[in-house]
Amino acid sequence: MDNQQIFDKAVKGLASQGFKRSMRSGTKECAYRGEGCRRCAIGWLIPNSNYSTKLEGKTPVDIDVRQAAGLKHDQQAFARRLQDAHDYAKNEYGVKENLLEVASSFNLKIPEVLQA
């Protein structure tokens, strides 16, 4: 997948959960798979068949996460920014705002669901 396809897939997944953050049960830590079947931005790129709890706590720069999500080595910086857009937002509005910044930084088209 190229960066636009990755962005579109992550945004679509995040939109499906109301742009709410994915948190580990009983903690304030973000998770690839979290409470209420939510996922983080990179979590939406990881098929269930590739997911393992061993991925939790690792960043998209880690080879295990990259392989699980189907990311190329040269997509590390993009994947990290996409993940940070989710992880460091204070609320749903912040997630959307951060995603718009990622789109701008990487010259990506903004999906319709993010424009609403």
Image: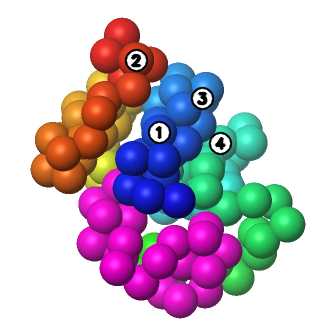
Task: Locate residue 109 relative to residue 28 in the image: left or right.
Answer: left
Kindly identify which residue carries mark 2: 112
Which numbered tag is attached to residue 8? 1
Circle 3 Cα neighbour tier, 10 Å, few/some/many (<14 / 14–19 / ≥20): some
Which numbered tag is attached to residue 17? 3
- The tag earlier along the polypeptide, 2 or 3, is 3
Circle 2 Cα neighbour tier, 10 Å, few/some/many (<14 / 14–19 / ≥20): few
Kindly identify which residue carries mark 4: 38
Which numbered tag is attached to residue 66? none
Structural distance between the alpha carbons of marks 4 and 3: 7 Å
Which element carries disc 3, helix, strand or loop?
Answer: loop
The segment highlighted magenta reads: 62-83
Amino acid identity at mark 4: Arg
**Residue beneath the point at 61% across and 50% down:** 44
Residue 107: give x, y in percent of width and height: 18, 45
Task: Locate residue 18 relative to residue 53 in the image: left or right.
Answer: left
State whether the magenta stretch is mostly helix, strand or loop.
helix
